Amino acid sequence: MSGEAQLAAVKEYIAKYNLEDELSNGVNLAIKQNSDDPFRVISDYLKTLAKEQDEDDDDDDDIIQEGEEMPMPVNRGRRQQVVAAKLDVPSDWKPKVVPKDEAQGNFLKDSMKANRLMKSLAPSDREQLMMAFEHVEYEPGAVIIKQGDPGDKFYILDEGTCDISIESKGSVMKATKGIAFGELALLHNAPRAATVTAETKATAWFIDELTFKSILMGKSQQDAIDYVEFLKAVPILKSLDESQIKELAGSLKETEYPKDKLIIAEGDEGNSFFIIRDGEVKCTKAGKSEEVSRRLKRGDFFGELALLSSDKRAASVTAVADTTVLMIARKEFTSLLGSLSDIIESAANYNK
């Protein structure tokens, strides 16, 4: 098999099992929990995806692609692994908020969506991180990062061209607008695995490890509080106890819908329940010129009957502004807690 064919086969395999996204999900989960054993968190997450448990995984090899940071290993038996220190956030720490125009904000969010580490973050996570990115300029020939130096910053190139080189290989990549480098610096202060040099006058956006982790951890804690409060306001979930509510809150998935995007269509099978985190939606029915309910906004919910059955949707729901929703599928709900109708019936019998 030729080199190109091998590379294509590897890419196909990675895409088939969604490996990049799932590994990124595990890493971000460890960051949000501020875990002092991130490998355990990541391992536990990946085990939930496994068909069978296989303990003999010590011989797997890590793959570092060109331009990526290479972690500094420490000896942990048969396998070389990275130890990331638990982050201690100063009590008076507050993230910087750097003013940006709409174009700059959209550029940073789009760049994060394309990045292996950040693309699996919730849209609102990327929104908060975007506000903290700082701008920096470099003259031609300036060394942005140097191989072997400690690093704690992640960069997204805005304008200009940069050369990425490794001592043993020479130049390995040319970075242009939107290219990011330094991802592993956000996980721990690892020595840089490559040198990045500005070939032209260049501008970039950067965020440091403390800011990145602190924003995600602080937001994760607030999200947990918000999600529980949202769920407690849903009438058909009143029979759930506190532990069930918290478990359900941990399974909500955040999704963005742009203005005028149809979220659910009248007549479709109902499979998911939605809570509005931000934005506004309208509810309409075929043959009626007026909307069939008030506009729904933050904290409002729709599609809740999908948790009880797969009845057809009674109305269409459309975003009238850029809208972020939290959602859970009936199948996932049932897997997590069991049948909601059974839970409600059980609670009713208990209260008789």
Image (cartoon, grey):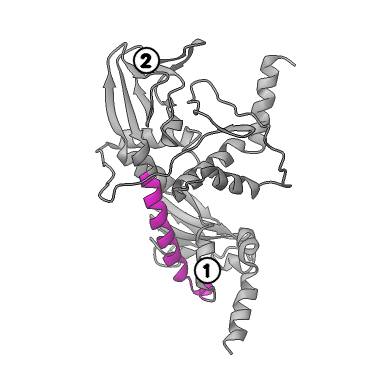
Q: Residue at x 31, y 41 (%)?
A: 131
Residue 321: tell me if it is visible.
no
Type of amino acid under label 2: Thr
Question: What is the span of residues highlighted in magenta in the rendered image?
Answer: 214-238
Q: Is residue 28 visible?
A: yes
Magenta-drawn stretch contains 230:
yes
Point 49% across, 28% down: residue: 72
Q: Which residue is mark 2?
A: 197
For badge 1, the amino acid type reads: Ser
Residue farthest bottom in this picture: 352
SS for callout 1: helix
Looking at the image, residue 349 sits to the left or right of residue 274; the answer is right
Q: Residue at x 51, y 67 (%)?
A: 245
Q: Quadrant of the N terminus?
A: top right
Q: Is residue 173 above or below residue 314?
A: above
Q: Going 26% across and 42% down the picture, which residue do you hit? A: 97
Alpha-carbon distance for marks 2 and 1?
52 Å
Predominant SS of the magenta segment: helix
Q: Are marks 2 and 1 in contact (CB under 8 Å)?
A: no
Counting from the top left corner in percent of width and height, residue 255 is at: 48, 50
How many C-alpha atoms fall within 10 Å of the one at disc 1: few (<14), some, or many (≥20)?
Answer: few
Tell me the tag on residue 243: 1
Query: Total marks drawn?
Result: 2
> In terms of image quadrants, where is residue 210?
top left
